[in-house]
Image (cartoon, rainbow, N blue to C red):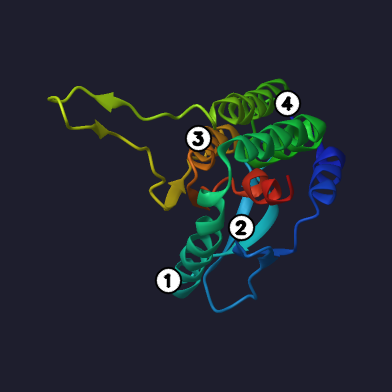
């Protein structure tokens, strides 16, 4: 079952997204610029459900710079604390599961039952990696007497995620959750066909 027109409107209203979607950086939507504006269609009905502006290279650079800045504090945060934050995100995904599933159905045209399953999996990713965050250990390496060698796992820094159209939220969380657990920061570029649940995810 996909959503009818009334349910589409309700899902979009509940998502509380701006009329023109732009990049979300540093806790705020970027001002509209002169980028190409594209429509987002519900493939089940071919109705236009949202519009977004393509990000310029300067906007992308700003997103990376912001992620690098906040990422330094995130990487230094106690791993167990990072894990607790990821577990709270899992809880938030479950608390907002109905809204996110309906928005995913509008965005991708998939049946609501499948969208609900995708949201449940998304929460499970954050739950799993929330529990793993303080268990990424290094190892000691056998050495001759008088020497000592060991490995330490360190964050890469900023990780870019380019997500596909077919399962936007679960594909995003599958990549983002382990990166955050390991102390990295992320910049996500959702599919231009299905950006809505990823952008709604900013409030989780």
Residue 178: mark: 3
Give the vertical position of 46 relative to 34 (above or below).
above
Farthest residue toward the bottom?
34
Residue neighbourhood size for the residue with mark 4, other residues' Cα within 10 Å, grouped as few (<14), some (14–19), many (≥20): some
Q: Point out the tag, 1 or 3, that comes first from the N-terminus.
A: 1
Assign a secondary structure to mark 4: helix
Q: Is residue 147 left or right of residue 91?
A: left
Q: CA distance from mark 3 to mark 2?
A: 31 Å
Residue 112: mark: 4
Farthest residue toward the front?
146
Q: Point out the tag, 2 or 1, that comes first from the N-terminus.
A: 2
Circle 1 or circle 3, nearest the eye: 3
Look at the numbered discs 2 and 1 and tell me whether their residues touch, using CB distance below 8 Å. Answer: no
| Place of residue 36 in the rendered image (x, y in percent of width and height, measured from the top left) | 52, 70
- Residue placed at 12% from the left, 25% from the top? 144
Q: CA distance from mark 3 to mark 4?
A: 27 Å
Which residue is tagged 2?
39
Circle 2 or circle 4, nearest the eye: 4
Q: CA distance from mark 1 to mark 3?
A: 27 Å
Q: Point out the tag, 3 or 2, that comes first from the N-terminus.
A: 2
Q: Is residue 105 left or right of residue 178?
A: right
Circle 1 or circle 4, nearest the eye: 1
Residue neighbourhood size for the residue with mark 3, other residues' Cα within 10 Å, grouped as few (<14), some (14–19), many (≥20): some
Which residue is tagged 1?
57
| Place of residue 75 in the rendered image (x, y in percent of width and height, measured from the top left) | 50, 50
- Residue placed at 32% from the left, 26% from the top? 139
Residue neighbourhood size for the residue with mark 2, other residues' Cα within 10 Å, grouped as few (<14), some (14–19), many (≥20): some
- Residue placed at 77% from the left, 31% from the top? 97
Circle 3 or circle 2, nearest the eye: 3
């Amino acid at each position: 079952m996909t959503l009818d027109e009334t349910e589409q409107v309700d899902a979009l209203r509940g998502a509380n997204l701006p009329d023109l979607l732009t990049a979300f950086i540093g806790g705020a939507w970027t001002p509209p610029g002169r980028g190409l504006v594209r429509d987002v269609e519900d493939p089940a009905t071919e109705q236009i459900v949202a519009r977004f502006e393509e990000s310029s290279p300067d906007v992308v650079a700003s997103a990376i710079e912001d992620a690098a800045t906040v990422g330094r504090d995130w990487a230094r945060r106690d791993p167990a604390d990072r894990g607790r934050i990821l577990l709270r995100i899992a809880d938030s995904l479950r608390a907002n599961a109905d809204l996110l599933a309906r928005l995913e159905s509008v965005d991708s045209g998939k049946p609501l039952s499948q969208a609900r399953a995708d949201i449940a999996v998304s929460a499970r990713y954050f739950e799993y990696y929330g529990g793993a965050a303080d268990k990424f250990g290094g190892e000691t390496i056998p050495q001759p007497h008088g020497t000592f060698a060991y490995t330490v796992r360190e964050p890469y820094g900023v990780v870019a995620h380019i997500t596909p159209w077919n399962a936007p939220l679960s594909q995003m969380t599958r990549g983002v959750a382990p990166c955050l657990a390991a102390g990295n920061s992320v910049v996500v570029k959702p599919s231009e066909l299905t950006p809505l649940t990823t952008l709604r995810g900013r409030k989780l």
